[in-house]
Image: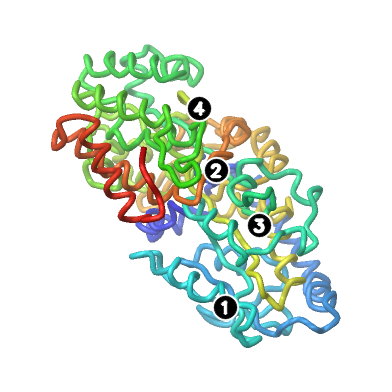
Amino acid sequence: MRHSMKRMLSVATSIAMVSSLAACGGSSSSSTTAAPAAETTAAAAAETTAAPAETTAAATEAATEAAGGDEGKVLNIECWNTEFQSRLTDHYPGYEKVDDTTGKIGDVTVNWHITPSDDNAYQNNLDEKLPANGDAAADDKVDLFLMEADYAKKYVNADVTMNVKDLGITDDDIKDQYQYTKDIVTDGSGVLKGLSWQACSAGLIYNRAIAKEVLGSDDPEKVQEAVKDWDTFNATAKTLADKGYKITSTVNDTYRVYSNNVSKPWVDGTTVQVDDNIKKWVDDSKALADAKETGVADLWSDDWSAGFYPEGKVFCYFGPAWLINFSMHGDDLKSVAGQGGWGFVVGPQSFYWGGTWIAAATGTDNPTLVKDIMLKMTTDPAILKDIAVKDADCVNNKSVLAELAGETIDPVAAEDGKAGNITFILGGQNPYQVLADGAEKVDMSNISDYDQGCNEEFQSAMKGYFDGNYKSYDDALAAFNKAIVEKYPELTTG
C-alpha cells in the first residue's frame, strides 16, 4: 500500500486505539470510516469472529484436500511490510502463528518473506524471483505476492501473475467489489490478475472551527458547496487567505485528486503525455502558491503536518480514512483530531489513496489454498467487517460499507495516549456513505505501467517551478522530460 510506510510512523501510538476505531469503508484505501458504538462494536466483533472460528476445521480441510493432496506443503508470501501478515494472522480461518516469519494453515507451512520498499528493493526482489518461479523448487516457489497501485500494471501485464479465473474465482464471487479496485489489476487484454480487501476512497478533510469562522457553518453540505469544483475551491482559498488561513498545507495535498481524474494515461505507446487535468493542477497550484494561499512543502514533512494543530491555520487536507485514523495525531489532545475538530466531504473530485492488492504468482503449487485466501480475505462479509472494526481498514465491499453507513455510531473521545474513533475525530460524523459514494466514482481505467515514475518525477520537477527555481512551466517540463527518459530509456517525450 502506498500509504503503508507512512502509517507505520504512527502505529506505535495507534495500537491502543484500533479496537475502538472503524476505518475507511469498514481503507483504499485510501483514497477514505467509523466505529460502531462500544456495545455494537463488541457485539459485531464477537459475531464476526465466531463464524471463522466455527469454520476453521472445515475451511482448512477444504483448502488442503480440494487439490487431492497434490499441492505444496509450503506457502511462500512476498510482501514489503507486515500489514497483510497481520490481516491473515488475525482473520483467516485456521491460520496459526508459529513465529514472526512463519505460520501454519493445516499441514501447510506459511513463510513470510518481507523486503522493505526502500530503494526499490521490494520490486527488485520480485523481478528476480517471479520470472523463474515456474522452475523453482517446490518449497521455494512464490505463491502469493502483494502489490501497490503505482506499479501493479508492471506485474499484471507480465506472465508472472495468474488470471484469477484460472484459480476458479468467478465474476459473481467479486460482484460486491468496487470497479476501480479491479481496473488497477486488470491487464491490457482485460484479464483480472489480483484482488484487494481495501477500497481507500478519499475526500476532503476540513477544519470545522475554520469553516464556522470563515464560511459561517461547519455543516458538511454547506462546506461541500464551498469546495464543489476547482474554480469554487480556488475562490474559497482567497476567502480563507483574507482571514489568515491557508486552504491546504501544500500544493502536494491536491496532486492525487487531479491525477486520479485524468482522461488519458501517462504513456501512449512509448510517448509520455501530460494530461490536461494534471496541467490544471500545475496552473491552479502555482496561482495558490504565488498568492500564499498554500505552501510548497513535501508531504509528511513537519511543515505539512503543522495544520494538524489549530495553530497551523490550515483549512483542509485530502485523504482517506487511514490518514485521519493513523496520521493526524488523534492521540494528542492538543491536535484538531484529538479535539474532534475535523469534518469530511467529497471535495472537488472523487479519488482514492492507498490500497494493497493480492496476486497469485504464476508457478504456484498451492492454487487451491491461494484461491481460498484471496476469496476469504477479499469477499467474505463477516471477515471484512471484522477487519473494518478491528483494524481500521477501508474494506472493498459495497454491502459492508452500506451496512456501516446505516449504523448509529457513538463518537468515542480521545484520551491521553489513545486516539478517539474516527466518528469523534470527525465531530460526530459517520463518513461511510461519503466513502462508499466516492469509491463508486473513482475511475482508474487510465492507469499505466509507468505511473509511479511519472508521478514522482513530475511532482519533483514542478516543485522547482513552484519554488521559483524554474522560471517557467516549460523549463520545469523540460526537466521532467529529461528525468523520465533517463528513468525509462524506452520512452520518448512530446
Q: Residue visible at 20% across and 35% down?
A: 475
**Frontmost residue, 405 versus 247:** 247
Q: What is the distance, in whole Å, between disc 1 and disc 2 at their CAs?
A: 37 Å
Q: Which residue does the numbered mark 2 point to in the structure image?
A: 24
Q: Residue visible at 36% across and 42% down?
A: 493
Mark 3 crowdedness (10 Å alpha carbons): few <14, some 14-19, many ≥20 = many
The quarter in which the C terminus is drawn is top left
**Amino acid at the residue labelled 4:** Val
Q: What is the distance, in whole Å, between disc 2 and disc 4 at their CAs?
A: 13 Å
**Amino acid at the residue labelled 3:** Lys
Q: Which residue does the numbered mark 3 point to in the structure image?
A: 193
Q: Which residue does the numbered mark 1 point to in the structure image?
A: 132
Q: Which residue does the numbered mark 4 point to in the structure image?
A: 346
Who comes first in sequence, dot 4 or dot 3?
3
Mark 2 crowdedness (10 Å alpha carbons): few <14, some 14-19, many ≥20 = many
Q: Please determine whether, in this image, residue 250 is positioned above or below residue 421.
A: above
Please report contact status of discs 3 and 2: CB closer than 8 Å, yes or no: no
Residue 419 coordinates in the image, percent (x, y)? 42, 48
Q: Residue visible at 46% across and 66% down?
A: 80
Who comes first in sequence, dot 3 or dot 2?
2
Who comes first in sequence, dot 1 or dot 3?
1
Label 1 residue SS: helix
Mark 1 crowdedness (10 Å alpha carbons): few <14, some 14-19, many ≥20 = some
